């Protein structure tokens, strides 16, 4: 049997390539869902920590944010996923929503640091100028600081997004059929140990390259609006 | 000694950074219409003093009364009072992501002092006066340092402040641009604006101000009219300072 016949048998018989397509949809769902949750949590934490700075009344809130970051960053993603599926959402039958939440909460901890350093990268004088005009700290944050911080944050979020996509390949641990799990299923079914894995690697690679391109375009757009 | 003209009254103002005592007790009344120049060597606390006036630095001790309200009190609405205290920074601090016009109108519109149309009309009028009306649609980084600082002054003026605080407004400028900024400030002073100016421009202090404060080691070492301070300095530190800068 030559290589093409082998490929055709592995992927085309019973429309098995559709397993991969379905898996890819699940992978994208988890990635995008987790990205949204991650950005929301990250922004919330970053801004909370910003306002906590130098405010003794908010010390507890600050401590809570630190606890979250420490715990999440200290646990491997796979372990975290298992904890969510088997302990926290033990009654869940479908692993996908659990994976979205787990990956989102994990990502939030990293996003928080990215967003915080983006906010800190904006010149201190900007906040001072805004406050000297009578804007509240919140108004200054929304209107003056965040629009400038985005320029620093976006590339980092792009990288986080790529890392997130690749991390979702462990979703199979909680009975989610993502693209990695789909490839494994094809291997088990056909006994073809190599080709599904090679194709899987290519699929991830192509998505990452496309994401990188999109990100570069977005960055260029942002640079323009700056009048540079 | 009660005086109805007092706009800012500083009582025993103290400020520590970590373990360094920068301001060691400053008492001064600034009257309506005063143009006060604050001079002194670097590290004497003059910028810190100015930044305490609108609470950008929170004092460690003492109080600051602005139009009768104690700004150091927790109960006071600082944002409301800051609207009446314009500030101009050494590094301009224009908002780089906004056009010049948006820089000028964003605070008055956001704080609902003016409608968008009113704010734009006012901003254009003030820009015209500093000769920059044609740059309204440009972004800050397309302007020279002197132009940026003139815009920064206009931005503060758009809020209709009662007093203007200047923190070394010409120190970051190329020498040939200092004049254009000082001219704007001089016009402002002539119109009766109350001003507190931290500066190294002794010519400006001498010509435009009606009071000069010499800060040294966190206290007001000498205070008087420009004639007194520059013509007949009493304390030794001021004499040696003037000998170095004049």
Image (cartoon, grey):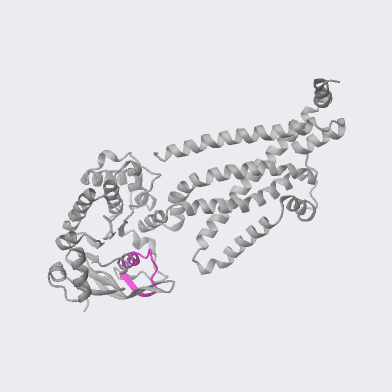
Residue at 44 percent across and 71 percent down: it is: B18
Of the pair A2 and B157, the residue shown nearer to us: A2
Of the pair A158 and A84, the residue shown nearer to us: A158
Position of residue B170 measured from the top left corner of the image (x, y, whole percent)? 26, 55
- The quarter of the picture where the C terminus of chain A appears is top left
Against B173, is A183 above or below? above
Position of residue A62 measured from the top left corner of the image (x, y, whole percent)? 57, 63
Region in magenta:
B48-65
Against B167, is B63 above or below? below
Of the pair A216 and A23, the residue shown nearer to us: A216
Residue at 57 percent across and 45 percent down: it is: A157
- The quarter of the picture where the N terminus of chain A appears is top right
Q: In this view, does A222 lie to the left or right of B93?
A: right
Q: In which quarter of the image is residue A159?
A: top right
Q: In this view, does B81 lie to the left or right of A52?
A: left
Q: Quadrant of residue B207?
A: bottom left
Position of residue B55 measured from the top left corner of the image (x, y, whole percent)? 37, 65
Query: Does residue A46 show up magenta in the picture?
Result: no
Residue at 46 percent across and 53 percent down: it is: A141
Q: How many marks?
A: 0
Q: Is residue A185 left or right of residue A214?
A: right
Query: Does residue B51 show up magenta in the picture?
Result: yes
Position of residue B223 measured from the top left corner of the image (x, y, whole percent)? 20, 73
């Amino acid at each position: 049997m030559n290589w093409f016949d082998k490929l055709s048998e592995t992927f085309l018989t019973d429309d098995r390539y559709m397993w991969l397509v379905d898996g890819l949809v699940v992978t994208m769902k988890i990635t995008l869902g987790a990205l949204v949750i991650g950005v929301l949590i990250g922004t919330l934490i970053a801004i909370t920590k910003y306002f906590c700075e130098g405010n003794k009344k908010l010390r507890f809130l600050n401590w809570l944010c630190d606890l979250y970051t420490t715990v999440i960053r200290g646990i491997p993603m796979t372990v975290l996923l298992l904890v969510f599926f088997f302990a926290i959402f033990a009654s869940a039958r479908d692993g996908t929503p659990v994976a979205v939440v787990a990956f989102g909460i994990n990502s939030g901890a990293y996003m928080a640091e990215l967003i915080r350093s983006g906010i800190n990268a904006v010149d201190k004088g900007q906040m001072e100028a805004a406050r000297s005009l009578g804007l509240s700290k919140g108004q200054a944050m929304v209107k003056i600081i965040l629009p400038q911080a985005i320029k620093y944050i976006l590339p980092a979020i792009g990288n986080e997004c790529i890392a997130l996509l690749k991390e979702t390949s462990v979703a199979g641990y909680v009975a989610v059929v993502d693209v990695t799990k789909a490839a494994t299923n094809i291997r088990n079914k056909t006994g073809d140990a190599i080709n599904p894995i090679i194709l899987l690697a290519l699929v991830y690679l192509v998505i990452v390259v496309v994401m990188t391109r999109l990100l570069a375009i977005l960055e260029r757009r942002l640079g323009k609006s700056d009048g540079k | 000694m009660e005086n109805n003209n007092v706009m800012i009254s500083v009582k025993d103002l103290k400020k520590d950074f970590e373990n360094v005592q920068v301001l060691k007790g400053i008492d001064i009344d600034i009257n309506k219409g005063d143009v006060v120049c604050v001079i002194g060597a670097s590290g004497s606390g003059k910028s810190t003093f100015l930044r305490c006036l609108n609470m950008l630095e929170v004092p460690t001790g003492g109080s600051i009364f602005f139009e009768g309200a104690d700004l150091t009190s927790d109960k006071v609405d600082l944002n409301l009072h800051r609207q009446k205290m314009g500030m101009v920074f050494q590094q301009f601090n224009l908002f780089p992501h906004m056009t010049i016009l948006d820089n000028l109108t964003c605070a008055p519109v956001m704080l609902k002092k003016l409608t968008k149309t009113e704010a734009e009309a006012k901003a254009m009028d003030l820009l015209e006066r500093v000769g920059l009306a044609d740059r309204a649609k440009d972004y800050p980084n397309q302007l020279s340092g002197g132009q940026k600082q003139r815009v920064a002054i206009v931005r503060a003026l758009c809020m209709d402040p009662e007093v203007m605080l200047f923190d070394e407004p010409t120190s970051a400028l190329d020498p040939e641009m200092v004049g254009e900024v000082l001219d704007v400030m001089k016009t402002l002073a002539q119109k009766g604006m109350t001003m507190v100016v931290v500066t190294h421009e002794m010519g400006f202090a001498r010509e435009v101000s009606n009071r000069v404060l010499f800060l040294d080691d966190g206290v007001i070492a000498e205070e008087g009219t420009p004639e007194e301070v520059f013509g007949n300095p009493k304390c030794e530190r001021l004499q040696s300072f003037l000998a170095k800068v004049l």
